[in-house]
Amino acid sequence: MAQPLSGNRVRRPSIGVGAIVWQGDAVLLIRRGKPPRQGEWSLPGGHQEWGETVEAAVRREVQEEAGLRLGALHFVAIVDLLEADRAGSTQRHYTLLDYTAEAVGGELRAGGDALDAAWFDPAAVASLPLWTKTHEVIAQARRLITQLRAR
């Protein structure tokens, strides 16, 4: 149930998108330049803009943060990100829609609110201190992209 802020205003989740991008067996990660998780490695992504489709948001975020163009997008998962204060009251609520795709063009470079962008071997990603859900969706995307490549 939505929680009132004040008057007639109601708090609602923000919609965000994430991309698990592949170049061969390497997966793309960006170093976040803004909260949440500022300075940490993560998937490229961000907020969906008003009037923008989810898939257009995925493509835009990857282009802005990593300079890459994507092939076909494949849905991976919905992830809820709930951040609470010390008293347990929800302060941020994001509904994240994660997609996977192959990089098909562009030149890797950090941009937008990304401090860095790099390709990682999935075995190396397993040892990175990423958010648990990030590890989970990368594993799901790897299984999916392997199945798609086998067709």
Image: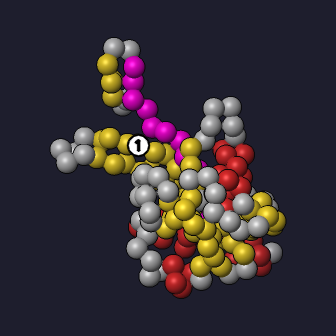
| Image quadrant where residue 71 sits | bottom right
The residue lying at 39 percent from left, 24 percent from top is 10
- Say whether residue 86 is left or right of residue 118: left
In the displayed structure, 36 sits above or below 102; it is: above
Q: Horizontal and vertical percent for residue 29?
A: 57, 68
Looking at the image, the residue that sits furthest to the top is 7
Tell me where the magenta segment starts and ends, as one range: 9-20
| Image quadrant where residue 67 sits | bottom right
The residue lying at 79 percent from left, 64 percent from top is 106
**Colouring convention used in this rendered image of the protein:** secondary structure
In what quadrant of the picture does the C terminus appear?
bottom right
Q: Residues within 10 Å of mark 1 (few under 14, many from 20)?
A: some
Looking at the image, the residue that sits furthest to the left is 87
Q: Amino acid at mark 1?
A: His
The residue lying at 53 percent from left, 41 percent from top is 15
In what quadrant of the picture does the N terminus appear?
top left
- Say whether residue 95 is left or right of residue 82: right
Residue carrying label 1: 93
- Say whether residue 1 is left or right of residue 75: left
Residue sitting nearer the eye, 107 or 101: 107
Residue sitting nearer the eye, 139 or 6: 6
- Say whether residue 6 is left or right of residue 133: left
Magenta region includes residue 116: no
Q: Horizontal and vertical percent for residue 86?
A: 19, 48
Q: Horizontal and vertical percent for residue 56?
A: 72, 46
Task: Determine the secondary structure under disc 1.
Answer: strand
The residue lying at 43 percent from left, 51 percent from top is 35
State whether the magenta stretch is mostly helix, strand or loop.
strand
| Image quadrant where residue 66 sits | bottom right
In the displayed structure, 16 sits above or below 135; it is: above
In the displayed structure, 112 sits above or below 92; it is: below
